[in-house]
């Protein structure tokens, strides 16, 4: 992972310019629990990082929170479930951890989850009280330079 602040902010700004919503529900493991934190995009510079994208797509914007970044999110976070329950649920499912987290968040808000492929430019992952949110679990990739350039055309 890299510390190029200008490139990091450039990718965040370009992502935000095409994203449907600037509201997020972040998921992460901390001390044996799975937390969810609800924020706006204002925290993105503090909880995302740059990483090399695959297949020559430049840099990628990722949510791979370190201990300090998790603490940043803890101010508004709540426990969703235990890490053990989350891991057991993910192991017994055909879905990946990000999808399992999205399902659990959706059910937390009393909604029925369905796997979809709606682009982040068209809608959020969930709407609660009229507010659309994107849901991201640790190790999630937001975008890479190549995909953002294609969206900007």
Image (tube, rainbow, N blue to C red):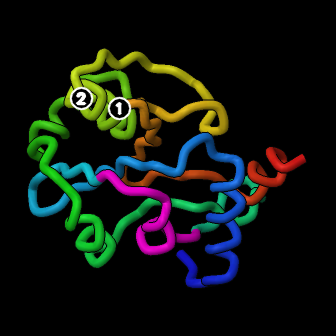
Name the residue beneath numbered marker 2: 109
Q: Nearer the viewer, residue 30 or 151?
A: 151
Note whether 151 is above or below 57 in the view shown.
above
Name the residue tied to disc 1: 128
Number of other residues with Cα within 10 Å of mark 2, as a class: few under 14, some 14 to 19, many 20 or more: few
Residue at (63, 74) in percent of width and height: 9
Name the side, left or right, on which 52 lies relative to 147: left
Based on the picture, tell me whether residue 136 belongs to the magenta stretch: no
User: Of tags 2 and 1, which is closer to the observer?
Assistant: 1
Position of residue 108 measured from the top left corner of the image (x, y, whole percent)? 20, 30
- Residue at 55% x, 44% y: name it: 21
Front position in the image: 44 or 34: 44
In the image, residue 54 sits, relative to residue 130, either above or below, namely below
**Which stretch did the figure color magenta?**
38-50
In this view of the protein, which residue sits in the foreground, 73 or 21?
21
Is residue 65 depicted above or below 127 in this figure? Answer: below
Q: Position of residue 121 (x, y in %)?
A: 66, 38
Residue sitting at the far right: 153
Residue 74 position, x and y percent, is 21, 65
Kindly indicate whether the residue at mark 1 contacts the one at mark 2 (C-beta within 8 angstroms). Answer: yes
Q: Secondary structure at mark 2?
A: loop
Which residue: 27% across, 34% down? 105
Q: Quadrant of residue 151?
A: top right
Disc 1 crowd, CA 10 A, few/some/many (<14, 14-19, 20+): few
In the picture, measured across the screen, residue 95 lies left or right of residue 111, that is: right
Outermost front residue: 130
Circle 1 SS class: strand
């Amino acid at each position: 992972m890299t510390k190029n602040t200008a490139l990091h902010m450039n990718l965040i700004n370009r992502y935000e310019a095409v994203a449907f919503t600037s509201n997020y529900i972040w998921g992460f493991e901390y001390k044996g629990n799975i937390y969810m934190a609800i924020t706006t995009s204002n925290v993105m510079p503090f909880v995302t990082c740059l990483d090399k994208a695959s297949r020559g797509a430049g840099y990628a914007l990722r949510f791979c929170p370190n201990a300090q970044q998790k603490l940043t999110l803890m101010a508004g976070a709540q426990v969703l479930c235990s890490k053990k329950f989350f891991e057991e649920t993910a192991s017994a499912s055909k879905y990946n951890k990000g999808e399992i987290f999205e399902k659990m968040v959706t059910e937390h808000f009393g909604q029925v989850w369905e796997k979809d492929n709606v682009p982040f430019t068209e809608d959020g992952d969930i709407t609660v009280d009229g507010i659309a949110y994107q849901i991201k679990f640790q190790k999630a990739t937001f975008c890479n330079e190549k995909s953002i350039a294609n969206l900007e055309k």
